[in-house]
Amino acid sequence: MENYDHDKACKVWQGAVELGVEGEEEEERYVERIIINESREEEARILREQKQQSFP
């Protein structure tokens, strides 16, 4: 799963680069940040769903 996440994040970063996004750090740093942010969003989504289930 980790390799899949890395591949997805690389594609997202490449898409951003194609749109003109630039950065001063190594490409891998941006890919890592995308993975971290996606993970945080997934955790937040799960928490929201759990709260909705406990408050019908």
Image (cartoon, rainbow, N blue to C red):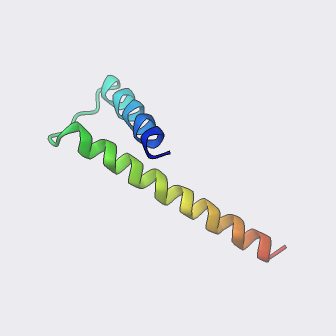
x and y, in percent, of residue 3 in the image: 42, 40
Q: Residue at x 33, y 23 (%)?
A: 18
Q: Residue at x 55, y 62 (%)?
A: 43
Horizontal relation, residue 52 to residue 43: left or right: right
In the orientation shown, which residue stands out farthest toward the right? Answer: 56
Q: Residue at x 29, y 27 (%)?
A: 20
26 shown above or below 14: below
30 shown above or below 42: above
In the orientation shown, which residue stands out farthest toward the bottom? Answer: 54
In the orientation shown, which residue stands out farthest toward the top? Answer: 18
Horizontal relation, residue 14 to residue 42: left or right: left
Count of marks placed on residues: 0
Q: Quadrant of residue 42?
A: bottom right
Horizontal relation, residue 45 to residue 17: left or right: right
Q: Quadrant of residue 46?
A: bottom right
x and y, in percent, of residue 52 in the image: 75, 69
Q: Nearer the viewer, residue 19 or 5?
A: 5
51 shown above or below 45: below
The C terminus - image quarter:
bottom right
x and y, in percent, of residue 6 in the image: 40, 40
Q: Nearer the viewer, residue 20 or 44?
A: 44
Horizontal relation, residue 50 to residue 10: left or right: right
Q: Residue at x 25, y 41 (%)?
A: 28
